[in-house]
Image (spheres, coloured by chain):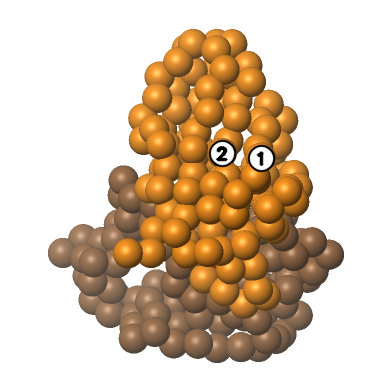
Amino acid sequence: GQQVMQIPQYQHVQEGEDFTTYCNSSTTLSNIQWYKQRPGGHPVFLIQLVKSGEVKKQKRLTFQFGEAKKNSSLHITATQTTDVGTYFCAGRMVDSWGKLQFGAGTQVVVTP
Amino acid sequence: EAQVTQNPRYLITVTGKKLTVTCSQNMNHEYMSWYRQDPGLGLRQIYYSMNVEVTDKGDVPEGYKVSRKEKRNFPLILESPSPNQTSLYFCASRTGTFTDTQYFGPGTRLTVL
């Protein structure tokens, strides 16, 4: 079964609001990646987190990796219409670096 | 331009008719992978390859085959497609080092009737 769970599955946001999507793994991860997929497009790599407790920022996006390396979050501030899309986390398992397990994704809809 | 290409982009076929989806990258990446995307399930890894002649199963390999005879190409083969293989397929590549960006192809939408 799916080891990487992502919530919420769907997020409806008013433009200007903040939101967070969460990713949880049943096992410890080597690292975690985040991707964005626009409607009709392909996943585009956003960032990779490797260290326990790591926090990285990309403009309005803040990514965190949990201390136990089992969970991660993506927080977007002041949402814009360009943030529309589905955000996926993907975890690399400790015992199998070749495998990458994706969460089911959070579909974000932004209302102007 | 650095890119991953897939062909065909769209394919409608019938049950049991063998097909191949090609994937090629021009970035000299060692690591390539195939995923399928289905609503509500995200992306699931089918097969991956860490270098020429080195392939391994992902989470959903049943019904698929792959080969890696050249570094740049990683075709996905469906020997006897079935309707449950109707999906959106993505090929991806990365250099194979521990920390690296993964680049996805544009996707192949496959319908098996």
Amino acid under label 1? Answer: Ser
A15 lies above or below B16: below
What's the residue at 75%, 51% (across, down)? B54
**Residue corresponding to mark 2:** B75
Pick the residue in front: B15 or B70: B70
Rounded to the nearest angstrom, the CA distance separating label 2 from label 1 is 6 Å
In the image, A69: left or right of B8?
A: right
Q: Chain of mark 1?
A: B
**Residue A4 seen by the camera:** no
Identify the element where label 2 is drawn: loop
Identify the element where label 1 is drawn: loop
B91 lies above or below A52: above
- Disc 2 and disc 1 in contact, CB within 8 angstroms: yes
Chain A colour is: brown
Pick the residue in front: B30 or B88: B30
What's the residue at 32%, 55% (across, down)? A38
**Residue corresponding to mark 1:** B67
Q: Which chain is orange?
A: B
Image spot of residue B14 (x, y percent):
49, 11
